[in-house]
Image (cartoon, grey):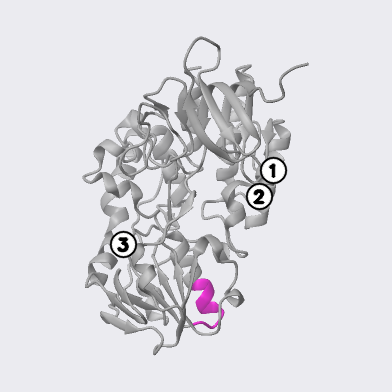
Amino acid sequence: MGDSRRPRAVEVAVVGAGQAGLITSHFLRAAGREHLLLDRRSTLGGGWQDRWDAFRLVSPNWTTTVPAFPYRGDEPDGFMTRDELIDHWRAYAAAIDAPVQLETDVTRLVALDGPGAARFRLTTSRGEIDAREVIVAGGPFQRPFIPGLAASLDPSILQVHAHDYRRPDQLPPGGVLLVGSGQTGVQLAEELQAAGRSVTIAVGHCARGPRTYRGHDLFWWLRQLATRGREVGAALPTPETLADPRARLGCNIHLSGHAGGHDTNLRRMASEGIRLVGRLEAVDGTRARFADDLGANLRYADTFFLERFGPLCQTLVERTGIDVPDGGIEQFDFEPPAVRELDVAAEGISTVLWTSGYRLAFDWIRLDEPVVDELGLPITDGGVSRVRGVSFVGTPWLVDMGSANLVAVVRDIEAMASRW
């Protein structure tokens, strides 16, 4: 009789069964490689299952087309709801017969010593697994981030991270202070204002983008730059080109897939009644102090796309012959008043909604050679780490700024598969 405690053996273990893990599974199967996808959740659908009830995809539906599974609907330029998106990835898993083991939380990865086919051992909530290779497909939304100053907020004010927010009536009556002006922050601000809430946004250093630029959706341009830009000298920003490595932790360009898709211009939102303040700098009980950077942050949001991406798009047009019209992006002339301090209780604010993003959580990887840097981001060459047999997919900035996005994740995985 065999030893039931002996670790299960598999050629390739893929940690995570979201879209990156599933796409990886497709290519592994095509290469004839035995593999197993491990996911801590009880159901398929990845991090999309953590989004709020009215969530819509920010990128158009056509971006969900992946190898062996095209978008199945009749609105390629529309924007899927949360539940439609979850259904899409579940159907993809079934279509490619992905070998998924759910309810399996991976808590430790170590290297094995000595001879044998397996190089690594994964400790999971369902026992140990030995693998020759490990591909980490954890995605960008791993650990909700709340800054330490939250501990100084009076307990009479409810604190909720966007990860746990579902709908306006989940929050107590009163106003809402959103901390963070990335994609989630601006969309939830619109939702809460439409529900009759008084909304204040603490605006960070986040860029906005046009829903449509020179006749095409923003994500059409990102796809072109991600897949064709490098060969014509119009590559997306890479980690090496950033002036400050910390920029990799910054916001995604904000816009919305709601109401048919639209721009999210903070100045316009302010003119329509949403109060804007600078970055949240300090908290003392019910008093909140904000940095004197609102004007600078709005200017950054206004100019980022044309300054950083306008030239790349123009180079792409000139060197590929793409036929697109000229054009810019909408500007809106409104200067919101400066507010440096608020007594949130006196202002009727009952909730602080942290739209402050996520941090990657790879502390379960315990290898002798570091595979993540001081910011917690993987150290890789196109997703392949310095430890032979350990790779990453679907994580931000593996190749460039598109690596965690639907427009570029297939590109990254295809490139990795070409090395197998």
Disc 1 and disc 2: Cα gap in Å? 6 Å
Q: Which residues are magenta?
A: 190-197
Please name the residue that numbered disc 1 is placed on: 90
Mark number displayed over residue 301: 3
Asked whether disc 3 touches disc 1, contact meaning CB atoms under 8 Å apart, the reply is no
Q: Earlier in the sequence, mark 3 or mark 1?
A: 1
Under mark 2, the amino acid is Ile
Tell me the mark number nearer the camera, choosing from 3 and 1: 1
Looking at the picture, how far across and down is residue 358, in whole percent? 44, 53
In this view, the residue farthest toward the top is 115
- Residue 34 as seen in the image, left or right of residue 1: left
Which residue is at a point 39% across and 90% down the rendered structure image?
A: 346
Q: Considering only vertical position in the picture, is 143 above or below 231? A: below
Label 2 neighbourhood size at 10 Å, few (<14), some (14-19), many (20+)? many
- Residue 247 as seen in the image, left or right of residue 225: left
Which residue is at a point 52% across and 75% down the rendered structure image?
A: 192
Q: Main secondary structure of the magenta part?
A: helix
Q: Which element is circle 3 on?
A: helix
Asked whether disc 1 touches disc 2, contact meaning CB atoms under 8 Å apart, the reply is yes
Looking at the picture, how far across and down is residue 244, in whole percent? 23, 46
Label 1 neighbourhood size at 10 Å, few (<14), some (14-19), many (20+)? many
Please name the residue that numbered disc 2 is placed on: 86
Q: Which element is circle 2 on?
A: helix
